[in-house]
Amino acid sequence: MKKIFTSIDFHSQDSRAVLLEVAVQNEPILCGLWTFDVRLGSKALLPDGKWTKICEHTEKGCDYTEIELHLTGNYRLQRSLLVNHKDKVLLLCDTILADEEQHTHASLFYQTEFYVSPKLRAKTSTETTEIKFRSASQPISAFRVLPLALPEWQTIKQPRFTKGTLTESDGTLVLRQESTGKALFD
């Protein structure tokens, strides 16, 4: 029996967000809009069309879905969800890609937000970039959020080609990244 349930609705929402629900053993942990903001320098890269599903794959113990949205400025946003049921891992990723060779020195800025169940409480660390969540009534950790593109330890200087933060405030997870170049993976 699957212990992690995910649902994504990318048809009924404004193109700047999809509706995401993640539950573990029927208890919601992430619920609501999964938003994004992408900028090239000071110029916003806006939706240029609708979300489309470009890949869906299921096999024993794993489910994978990938959707894509074209953005202005010849960029694309690819959003991926991978659930590994055996190891109880959920990977949520956004990838920003240039459709053609871009000759710009402008920074690529990205921000995304997730809404966490109001039944969960966040515990941030002063040493690492991860955030742990637990039920208000349980002392054990319900899940952890690890930003793959950021250094694990806060004391490590971030590489000059990418920098960012992961924060939580009032039940909203916010990941911000900035990169030089024509692509970004979070």
Image: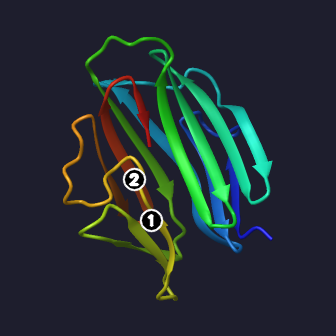
Left or right of 54? Residue 179 is left
Q: Position of residue 3 (x, y in %)?
A: 71, 70
- SS class, disc 1: loop
Given residues 100 and 13, the one toward you in this image is 100
Nearer to the camera, 111 or 98: 98
Identify the mark at residue 126; answer none if there is no mark.
Answer: none
Could you tell me which quadrant the N terminus lies in? bottom right
Up-down relation of residue 63 to residue 49 (above or below): below
| Residue 103 x, y percent position in the rendering | 33, 11
| Mark 1 nearby-residue class (10 Å; few <14, some 14–19, many ≥20) | some
Crowd band around label 2 with a 10 angstrom C-alpha radius: few (<14), some (14–19), many (20+): some
Residue at figure coordinates x 34%, y 42% from the top left: 177
For residue 171, the mark is: 1
Residue 38: give x, y in percent of width and height. Answer: 41, 32
Residue type marked 1: Gly
Query: Which residue in the protein does label 2 denote?
Result: 174
At 29% from the left and 70% from the top, the residue drawn is: 125
With respect to residue 126, does 19 lie above or below? above
Question: Quarter-wise, where is residue 101 in the image?
Answer: top left
Q: Gap in Å between the C-alphas at discs 1 and 2?
A: 10 Å
Establish if 41 lies above or below 83.
Answer: above
Q: Residue at x 72, y 55 (%)?
A: 62
* Quadrant placement of the C terminus: top left
**Residue sitting at x 65%, y 35%:** 67
